[in-house]
Image: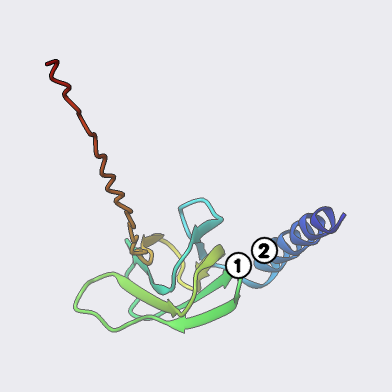
Amino acid sequence: MGGLFKRRAAGVLLLFALLVSVLVVSPAGAQVQQQPVPITVACGGTWHWVHNQTSATSGTLTALFSTGLRVVANTPSNSANLHYHITLSTGATLLSASDNVSGGKLLLSDTPVCETTTTSTSTTSTSTSTTSTSLAP
């Protein structure tokens, strides 16, 4: 019974988050991220977006994660594109992202890369056999 309640609660939370993302994250004239969401990453790290094909020199990205809403200004760059970076300390699911720049394309360029640890166990077995030889007189 508890598992069913948790799944329903998670479904309601996801539906609410998607509704909020449509109402809050997509202001008029904004570009919505081109890749489909949700995108889940199991570890913390830096998320990187690029808004290309625009003449804008500044912008603000709004990203809704399962862990909360983040709003950041573009990161200064020598590139003709706008770059945005958000660093999270834990894994999260990206539910939506958009910026306030019209035209061009907003693309999620990089997500955190989780390190994997492989553990192997080695077992050594030793067998001993005894052979007896009987000599007849």
Which residue is rendered at x = 48% and y = 63% of the image? 42
* 74 sits to left or right of 131: right
- Nearer the observer, 104 or 34: 34
What residue is shown with label 2? 22
| Dot 1 alpha-carbon crowd within 10 angstroms: few under 14, some 14 to 19, many 20 or more | some
Quarter of the rendering containing residue 17: bottom right
Q: Where the N terminus falls, by quadrant?
A: bottom right
- Nearer the observer, 95 or 79: 95
Alpha carbons under labels 1 and 2: distance apart: 6 Å
Q: Are marks 1 and 2 in contact (CB under 8 Å)?
A: yes
x%, y% of residue 58? 37, 81
x%, y% of residue 97? 52, 66
Secondary structure beneath dot 1 equals loop
**Could you tell me the amino acid type at mark 1?**
Ser
Q: Is residue 90 above or below residue 129?
A: below
- Nearer the observer, 120 or 71: 120
Residue found at the far right of this picture: 1
* Residue 124: mark: none
* Residue 26: mark: 1
| Dot 2 alpha-carbon crowd within 10 angstroms: few under 14, some 14 to 19, many 20 or more | few
Secondary structure beneath dot 2 equals helix
- Nearer the observer, 1 or 83: 1
Labels in figure, total: 2
* 75 sits to left or right of 136: right
Q: Is residue 23 above or below residue 134?
A: below
x%, y% of residue 116? 34, 60
Which residue is rendered at x = 83% and y = 53% of the image? 4
**Could you tell me the amino acid type at mark 2?**
Val
Which residue is rendered at x = 20% and y = 28% of the image? 132
x%, y% of residue 108? 40, 61
